[in-house]
Image: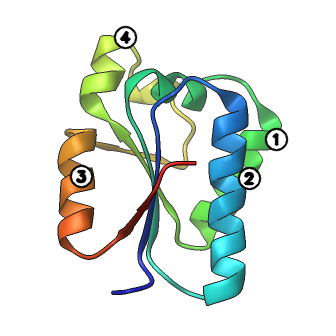
Amino acid sequence: MADALCLHIDANDPARLRLALKNARNYLTVVGEAPVTLLANGPAVNLFTAPNPELEAMAAELTGKGVRIELCQFALNEHKITPEQLWSCCTVVPAGMGALVEMQRKGYAYVKP
């Protein structure tokens, strides 16, 4: 699984999310099909509740191409965010760090835009 990629964001920064989404899009353009996950934890989970049509559309387009957007349940709890508040293209994982370790164990390359 040499082509698998994990993009990790943990800052509540729309520019950082935009960069991560562009990184995912560009990566898939070059390699074709590959497992790609954008993992958000910490304050970054707030980005996926904010009304931002441009970023939400980019995220939805990428998930339509197989990219997974995973958000940490611990971070959601800390920031008092319910799954109903999230963009529909997001998936909640029990622990962001656990998901990250599992991806690295499976051979995902780690990039923090």
Residue 14 falls left or right of residue 85:
right
**Label 1: which secondary element:** helix
**Which residue type carries mark 2?**
Met
Determine whether 97 is above or below 111 in the image: above
Q: What residue do we see at 39% from left, 21% from top?
A: 82
Please tell me in which quadrant of the rendered image residue 106 appears: bottom left
Q: Mark 1 or 3, which is nearer the eye?
A: 3
The residue at which mark 1 appears reads as 54
Label 4, residues with CA under 10 Å away: few <14, some 14-19, many ≥20: few
Residue 45 in view of the camera: yes
Q: CA distance from mark 2 to mark 4?
A: 25 Å
**Which residue type carries mark 1?**
Glu
Mark 2 near mark 1, Cβ–Cβ under 8 Å? yes
Residue 52 falls left or right of residue 91:
right
Disc number placed over residue 99 in the picture, else none: 3
Q: CA distance from mark 1 to mark 3?
A: 27 Å
Determine whether 38 is above or below 96 in the image: below
**Which residue type carries mark 3?**
Ala
Disc number placed over residue 58 in the picture, else none: 2
Colour scheme in use: rainbow
**Label 2: which secondary element:** helix
Q: CA distance from mark 4 to mark 3?
A: 21 Å
On-image quarter of the N terminus = bottom left
The residue at which mark 4 appears reads as 80
